Amino acid sequence: MSPMPASAARAAAAPAAWVAPLPAPVAAAEAPAAVPAWWGRFDDPALAALVEQTLAANPGLQQAQARIQQARALAQQAGSARSPDLQLNGLAQTQRLALAEGVPRQRLAQLNLEAGWEIDLFSRVRLGAEAAGARLQVSAFDAQAMRLALAAELARQFIALRACERQTQIAAEDAQAAIRLAAWSADKQAVGLESAAASTLLRAAAAEGQSRQLAQQAECEVQIKALVALSDRPEPALRALLAAGHARLPVLSGGGLSVHALPAQTLAQRPDLAAGEAQLRAAWAERGAAEAGRYPQLRLGGSITLAALQLAGGPRAEGSGWSFGPSLTLPLFDGGARRAEAQAAQARFDEAQAGYRGLVLQAVREVEEALVRLDAAGARSQHAQASAAGYTAAAQASQESWRAGLSGAPELEQLRRQALAAQAALVALQAERLSAWIALYKAAGGGWQADAAAID
């Protein structure tokens, strides 16, 4: 049977080069001696601890390990069909025939050794074993893909929580500042230096700031609940773990990820694509096994029998026998069942091939999108920092001018709102850039390598 063209789907679907700009590679001097898992490159130890603990106890991963054990057992069962079948049967019985009165009892003892072996003329047995082995690889690669997806989702949720905490800090600082401004405005109004409308405006701004702070705090509580569900960790223990880095977005050390310029090298790191390729190999082998099932099957068999028979009160008779010879099965007419099975197996292979091509196209899209978002976030970062610093300085200057009576409350409140929005946008952009790195790690396989997948 001809070998499967394993590279056909990938070569047809993968582009020759990435279109989006690649991140700068890590310099040799910056690369650590022992590269940690990608989540260990963030400088917040709580993230690494949370991911490691989650991967060790996640119920979904435990189910994936159970599926690997099932696939391993099926692979062993399929592989045993290529070995000779040897069975030992023993029989010992006492009986009396119900024919007439006085018929004596008889005792029979028999030992039978049988052996059989199918000569794999058309590779039906071999291909069945190869298909089962490929299914085992699919289970192992699926478990690796689940680990990668779980770690990426946990890291993304972790970044979202840290950004939410920082946003809450900003909202709290703004609310306190608004309360102070409202108090100063009330004092100015009491001595006739502030209008009632301006004082009312600043009191309304203070109330809005407190409402915004409470809403942001509630959002952070929701983020914590999501982390509890993802990590399967008690909430008090999770809060204790998160306390040290409260409201601080982690920093990615080591310069981030160096993406291969050739898409094929990057895609080879993805466990889901490795699973898809193994699925394709399994479908190809099952197709061949179904086709081979339409042809004759030759089997060698033999047996050795030892027996002893004794009638009550009579002598003991012993004997032995043996047999050996081939048996040939010729499928003549089955109503088209074998042909239909071969056609169904071919259709399953076509389905697996199309599914694999779809996986490759989706993987290329995910990498390209992550590269675009990462590049855009990096390009916007300098502008967002300048915007936040400028609006904050303008708001502070307007506050001093208002206290001196040189500007009005509406102008002050407008600048305060702009400064708050700019600071919130800067935090959101920082979180977006970290999330883009996480998406790129996931899209590029997270450093996973096909030869590192443990299926033993």
Image (cartoon, grey):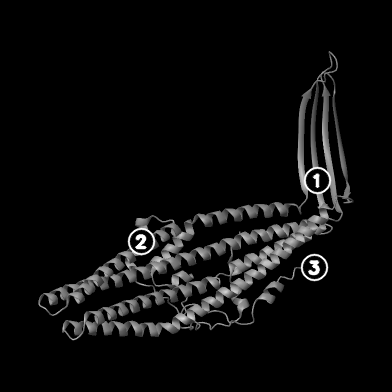
Residue at 87%, 42% (x, y): give it: 323
In front: 170, or 331? 170
**Circle 3 residue:** 2
Which amino acid type is shown beneath numbered disc 2?
Glu
Counting residues from the start of the chain, the first of labels 1 and 2 encountered is 1
Image quadrant where residue 412 sits: bottom left
Disc assigned to residue 115:
1
Q: Dot 1, crowdedness within 10 Å: few (<14), some or many (≥20)? A: some
Describe the element under mark 2 as helix, strand or loop. helix
Describe the element under mark 3 as helix, strand or loop. loop
- Vertical side of 196 occupied by 120: above or below: above
Residue 151, x across and y down, in percent: 48, 65
Tell us which disc is closer to us: 1 or 3. Answer: 3
In front: 196, or 279? 196
Can residue 55 be seen here? yes
**Circle 2 residue:** 221
Which amino acid type is shown beneath numbered disc 3?
Ser
In the rendered structure, the answer to whether residue 431 lies left or right of residue 149 reads left
Counting residues from the start of the chain, the first of labels 1 and 3 encountered is 3
Figure quadrant of the C terminus: bottom right
Which amino acid type is shown beneath numbered disc 1?
Ala
Q: Dot 2, crowdedness within 10 Å: few (<14), some or many (≥20)? A: some
Tell us which disc is closer to us: 3 or 2. Answer: 2
Residue at 80%, 42% (x, y): give it: 114
